[in-house]
Image (spheres, rainbow, N blue to C red):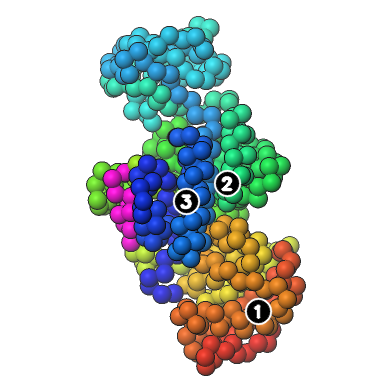
Amino acid sequence: MSSNLRRTKILATLGPATDPPGVLDALLNAGVDVVRLNFSHGDPSGQVARAQAVREAAQRQGVEVGILVDLPGPKIRIERFAEGRVLLKAGDRFDLIASTDAPPGNLREVGVSYLGLPNDVAPGDVLLLDDGLLQLRVGAVDGARIVTTVLNDGALSDRKGLNKLGGGLSLGALTERDKELIKIAAELGADFIAVSFCRNAEDMHEARRIAREAGCDAALVSKIERAEAIENLGEIVEASDVVMVARGDLGVEIGDAELPGLQKKIIRESLARNRVVITATQMLQSMVDNPIPTRAEVLDVANAVIDGTDAVMLSQESAAGRYPVKAVEAMSRICLGAERQFDHDTDFEAAPRNLERADQAIAMAAMFLTEHIGVRAIVAMTESGGTARFLSRFRSNAPIYAFSRHAGARRRMALMRDVYPIDFDSRGLASRDAARSAVKQLFDTGKLAQDERVIFTSGDTMEQHGATNTLRLLQVGADGCAEGLGEL
């Protein structure tokens, strides 16, 4: 693979920092593959306008850019203080009031948004505020009032998040507002919908049902950020199209020490189940204020790449930071550097046996050939992107050029590691003619050269989902003519 062809994909969150004229185009030019619209912030109409701006910028630049709508979910927050913030001292009593008529907060108490919290906590539990910066130990529960003792000094301001150490909060993943926002996601043509704080497979099934009823075929992303999600990881991954390692709230609930091992486990589990996986949260956090990342951040991103993540994500760095474009450029550099050091070695002995789908078997055969005979690229004709996804689960040095006539499928493939979607209308073409045309197109655009070998996968029926059943080994001849059009 060309040394400047980045395999790992980049998500960037849009926000005030990306709104000025020219910034969005610069982000796409720097290498953003998918943008994230965080519906926890701002008015939905503003996010709809950003989505439209993304479509226009992608069209100007001739690139495939996916849009991910991130639902707020049931984020528990404290309410507001009379003076905006308080300074708490270790040993102080501080009460949380789970009531709609809680007074403005002060040094002694503050309201909390989740009215069921008193039922979910007991004396001895530790509650974590503001991503764990302030810790409270529950001493007693008296009706709607939770009496706690402050465990460490710290400032606390309006609307900070609240977690319970070890998890165990019973509220569901989809709020009524989330259900309404899924409909807005459908209207703006979202390619991905991320479900925050999912607990189990049913949370994902419910989100999928709502999306489909709204006429939305977006891929469903499970955000792994609750302790309960770790316990149900297998079923959640199976119920998802994409899995996100959401390290912020997850780290707060399970503790920082457990996070690195769990990140690797989630990535490994996702790849084993043929799911796409994103690693997110504070990857280049220092670049909110600084033009270059720290060495620790460089290592963090690189380790995620080496672990096999499909994509890495920028949050505040691009949405509200001072250097959004530089953050994307840094992310791209780090990914490329890590990929050059990545020594893949697919263990075909450990690969699944008794495959039920022909397209999975074709994908495995393609990757086996790629590793053993030396292939410059894999060309996959695909309707929905399923073949490209199966191919990308086996890591190899060969880029996967995924040809599809469906814009939505191409944008969803923009998130898959090693996959490069290309607009191609195969209707009316026989498989051999499609192969000739695709190889010539790649040759003419400089992606293939004479005498290089290519694997071509397709179905006998070109316009049928999940119909990939043919594999050909081709060689690029003079003027990009595909030679050796015999089936293997």
**Residue occupied by mark 2:** 188
**Residue 54, relative to residue 29: is it above or below?**
above
Within 10 Å of disc 2 (Cα), the crowding (few <14, some 14-19, many 20+) is some
The answer to which of 143 and 34 lies nearer the viewer is 34
Mark 2 secondary-structure assignment: loop
Residue 42 spot, x, y in % from top left: 45, 35
**Residue occupied by mark 1:** 434
Mark 1 secondary-structure assignment: helix
Residue 446 spot, x, y in % from top left: 45, 80
Q: Amino acid at mark 3?
A: Ala
**Residue occupied by mark 3:** 53
Q: Is the C terminus in the top left, top right, bottom left or bottom right quadrant? A: bottom right
Residue at 72%, 80% (x, y): give it: 430
Mark 3 secondary-structure assignment: helix
Magenta part, dominant SS: helix
Image: magenta residue range: 321-335
Marks 3 and 1 in Cβ contact (< 8 Å): no
